Image: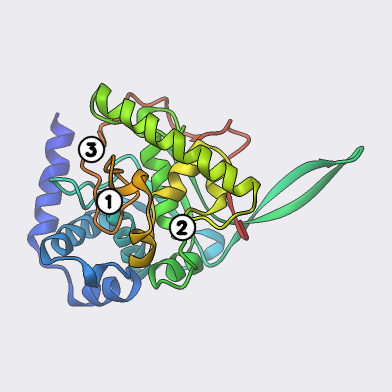
């Protein structure tokens, strides 16, 4: 109780100061949606950015120097997922962010014939349950400026984080009420199977075929629709029969997710995998 009160007091003190003018420029330049948001939503994003930047532990991977400008870009893009809530949401369980200058590498092994092939796999980002969120700054910048061909690594990895708030990263975030959970399953399962079929047939689809890998990746891929044109093409999955809490990140319709989640399983678990198999979002996916 005391620590919660202390945290709220620190946030009030932090938010009492206006956002530095340079940060406005950073958000306009590196969060492409920011300039299109109404003033009220811009103000909410500013609050999230101030607290997010101040409270997270920021680490540069491989000696990379992380600046406030980079922190604001990550925080601003992540904030898009929560702009539909009544109150600002600060991603409290995401305690640390690791930024690499570019794609970083993970060792990987796979079978080919009778032998085992070992290689290094380039990675743009990954999210660990109750652990760090790891990102490539180069990809963060491209995503924020609209130069990443409809992908956004920040939204993708933070979608995994939100998916895991109920203790399982399975493509179903914690929703309020039985009716919402039933509707979620009915609509998302149909669209997931549709995407799997499109991927198998190598058909053009609104959602990236990477989302057909499993339901967790489907959730993370579907939560970001980058452009007005793509948004206009969304199926009933996004806009008609159900209001998808995350997919319409542009409007920030995240108000139906219960961000309190369930009791933690403890730190150090990679989302959706065993400790030896972290969830990788690989370059060239």
Could one spot residue 59 in this view of the protein? no
Q: Do we see residue 252 in this rendering?
A: yes
Nearer the viewer's eye, disc 1 or disc 3?
Answer: 3
* 162 vs 178, nearest the viewer: 178
Tag nearer the camera, 2 or 1 = 2
Which type of secondary structure does the marked residue at label 1 adopt? Answer: helix
Q: Is residue 194 left or right of residue 105?
A: left
Dot 3: few (<14), some (14–19), or many (≥20) neighbours within 10 Å? some
Q: Nearer the viewer, residue 64 or 157?
A: 157
Quadrant (top left/top right/bottom left/bottom right) for the N terminus: top left
Write down the residue under mark 1: 55
The residue wearing badge 3 is 256
- Which residue is found at the position 33% from the left and 25% from the top? 182
Give residue 153's mark: 2
The earlier-in-sequence mark between 2 and 1 is: 1
Instruction: Point out residue 22 in the picture as x, y percentages from the top left corner.
Output: 23, 77
């Amino acid at each position: 109780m005391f620590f919660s009160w202390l945290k709220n007091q620190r946030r009030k003190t932090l938010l009492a100061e206006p956002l530095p003018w340079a940060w406005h420029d950073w958000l306009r330049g590196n969060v492409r949606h920011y300039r299109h948001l109404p003033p009220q939503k811009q103000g909410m994003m500013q609050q999230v950015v101030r607290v997010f930047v101040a409270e997270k532990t920021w680490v540069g991977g491989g000696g990379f120097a992380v600046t406030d400008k980079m922190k604001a870009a990550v925080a601003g893009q992540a904030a898009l997922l929560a702009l539909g809530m009544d109150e600002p949401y600060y991603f409290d369980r995401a305690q640390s962010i690791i930024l690499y200058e570019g794609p970083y590498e993970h060792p990987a092994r796979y079978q080919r014939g009778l032998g085992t092939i070992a290689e290094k796999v380039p990675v743009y980002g990954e999210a660990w349950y109750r652990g760090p969120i790891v990102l490539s700054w180069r990809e963060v910048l491209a995503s924020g400026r609209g130069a990443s061909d409809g992908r956004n690594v920040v939204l993708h990895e933070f979608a995994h984080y939100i998916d895991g708030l109920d203790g399982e990263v399975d493509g179903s975030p914690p929703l309020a009420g039985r009716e919402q959970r039933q509707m979620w399953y009915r609509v998302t399962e149909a669209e997931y199977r549709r995407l799997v079929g499109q991927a198998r047939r190598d058909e053009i689809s609104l959602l990236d075929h990477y989302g057909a890998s499993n339901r967790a990746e489907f959730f993370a891929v579907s939560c970001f629709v980058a452009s007005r044109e793509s948004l206009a093409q969304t199926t009933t999955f996004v806009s008609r029969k159900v209001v998808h809490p995350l997919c319409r990140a542009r409007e920030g319709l995240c108000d139906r997710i219960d961000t309190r989640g369930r009791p933690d399983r403890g730190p150090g678990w990679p989302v959706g995998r065993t400790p030896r198999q972290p969830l990788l979002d690989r370059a060239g996916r």
